[in-house]
Structures are given as C-alpha cells and as structure tokens.
Amino acid sequence: MKTSTITLLTTILSLAICTSLTAQTDPGFKVFSVLENREITLEELVNANQDTQVLFFGEEHNDSIGHAVQAMLYQRLLEKYQAVTLSLEMFETDCQLVLDEYRLGLITEDKFEKASRPWSNYATDYEPIVKQALEADQYIIAANAPRRYVNLVSRKGLAALDELPKAARQYLPKKDIYTEDRDYEDRFWEIMQVSGHDRSDPFFHAQCTWDATMAGSIANRWKKDKETLVFHLNGRFHTDYQQGTMTQLQRLKPKLRQKNISCFPASDFAKPDWDQYKDQGDFIILTQPK
C-alpha cells in the first residue's frame, strides 16, 4: 500500500474519533487526571499543562487508537500554545541532520525515509504527526540513541562507550548515564527475566542509555528554545511512574517542569478501576482493546 494511502487511512481514523467525540458517543479512549482524581476531556488535559515544559506521551507502539489520540492531542497543543516541539523516540540522534534537511524542504520525502531508518510502522503511526509538525513549522527532535551503540552496551557494558571515537560520542549523553534507580531496575528485570536474562547481563545499562540519550536530546533542544513546550513520544515503560527518561531529565535539569501521560489498551475499559493505574502517570489514557 502506498504511503499516501496509509496516511489517508490514519487521518480518517483520527477524524472518526473526533466525530465520535463531537457526537458525545464512546470515542474509544478515556482520559483521567491523577491530580484531579477524575475523568477529563482532551481539552482539559491541554489546559492542565499551561506551566508544563516537557510533556511525555508514553504509548504502546502497536496501539492504533493511542496513535490517533497523539495526533489529536498534538493538534490541540499547537492551537493552545503555538510553539510545541515534537520529540520522538522513533528517530535516532545521528539522523537529526537528515530530519532537519527534510523539515527545511532540502531533501525529498523519499530520500528522508531512506536515510533516517524509520520504524516499520512509521507510515501508519508516526508519519501523520510528523506531517503535523512540518505543517505547523515546528522543530522535530530525533531523540533516541543509535541502536548500534545501545547494542554495544548490551554486549559489553557502559564502559565500552569510552572506546568510541569522539565523532560517535556526539550522539550520546554528554554526562554520565545514571543507573542507580532500583525501582526502575526492578521493573525492568521483571520483564527481562521472562526472556531468560538475569541481573548479571548489562541490558539494564543499555535501557539507561536509551533513557539518558532521550533526556539529553530534550535538554539540549530546550536550552536553545526555552519558550517551547516539548511533546515527547516514547514507549510508556520509559516514563511510567515518572522513571526512566524522566529521571534522567530531572537529574540534568532539576527545575524543568515535566509531566507524563501513560496510554494503553485496558481490559476494564468499560468501567475502569483508575486506582490501579494512577501511580503510572500524571494523566492516564485508556484505549479500547481491539
């Protein structure tokens, strides 16, 4: 299927959800404010972030409704705040130049996609929001660590990064990568042990490399434009419970005001037990399971 056709289908999905909202029927998602302890609308979520400087949207990568909600929320943020930088886990720091060239109209979409190593679901799930940022003339951050360096850490440990040439180090955090969040590490190993790994493996440090690189990318861009709201998309494990990337960013910029959204399909969607989710984020968005 051609990219333009896929993008059209995604747009139709977003419009269908918008129409459903307008008609006051079940839109396929519910938003909960932990601070206010109640369900809210997307508009109320936008208004609740007037003083926020970095808003994290933690997603399930294969949640089509969640991706549509992202696009809707980003559009509302643009309408409210005008300057909203889009930051993406889905592009790696060594692709920032390519992304900038595409944003400035210097290279074609085809060349951009060939050079930027987009995820396999880019056309369906991320291209629409990238196009929104382009149309609104907003900066886009390629935030994540290059996979080859994360793989290096997963095989040889963090010390192996010191062996990289200086030219490679520019794509990684400038400061030491924090690895001492034990609650986050415990959550990580609960998942990894299912795959047969144990704490003797350096995989948690590879996870921290992802987190620290995304945090550094956001901090570096914010220093250049302190008037913008940064809207960052990542897999929700990176930011649930205000851990991972949020912890790394807090250590870099303690005064930076950040909030997080945790968005995922829920089996109790029809009648949510919000108490079981409220520790995961400042806002919880539940989507209807497929």
Image: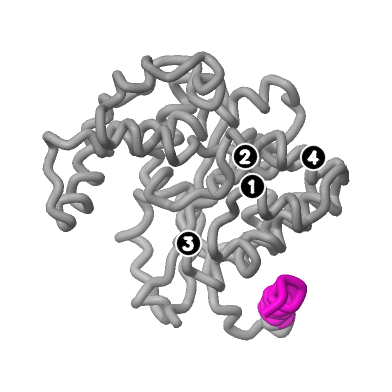
> In the rendered structure, which amino acid carries the disc numbered 1?
Ser
Mark 1 or 2: the one toward you: 1
Residue 254 appears in the picture as rendered: no
Q: Residue 166: x percent and y percent?
A: 51, 14
Q: Which residue is mark 2?
A: 142
Q: Residue 235: x percent and y percent?
A: 45, 52
Q: CA distance from mark 4 to mark 2?
A: 12 Å
| Element class at badge 3 | loop
Task: Indicate which disc, 1 or 4, sits on the residue closer to the N terminus.
Answer: 4
Q: Residue at x 27, y 29 (%)?
A: 181
Q: Residue at x 33, y 35 (%)?
A: 206
Mark 4 or 2: the one toward you: 4
Mark 3 or 2: the one toward you: 2
Task: Indicate which disc, 1 or 3, sits on the residue closer to the N terminus.
Answer: 3
Asked if residue 270 is positioned above or below residue 128 in the image, the reply reads below
Give the camera-side residue of 55 and 154. 154
Give the camera-side residue of 3 and 18. 3
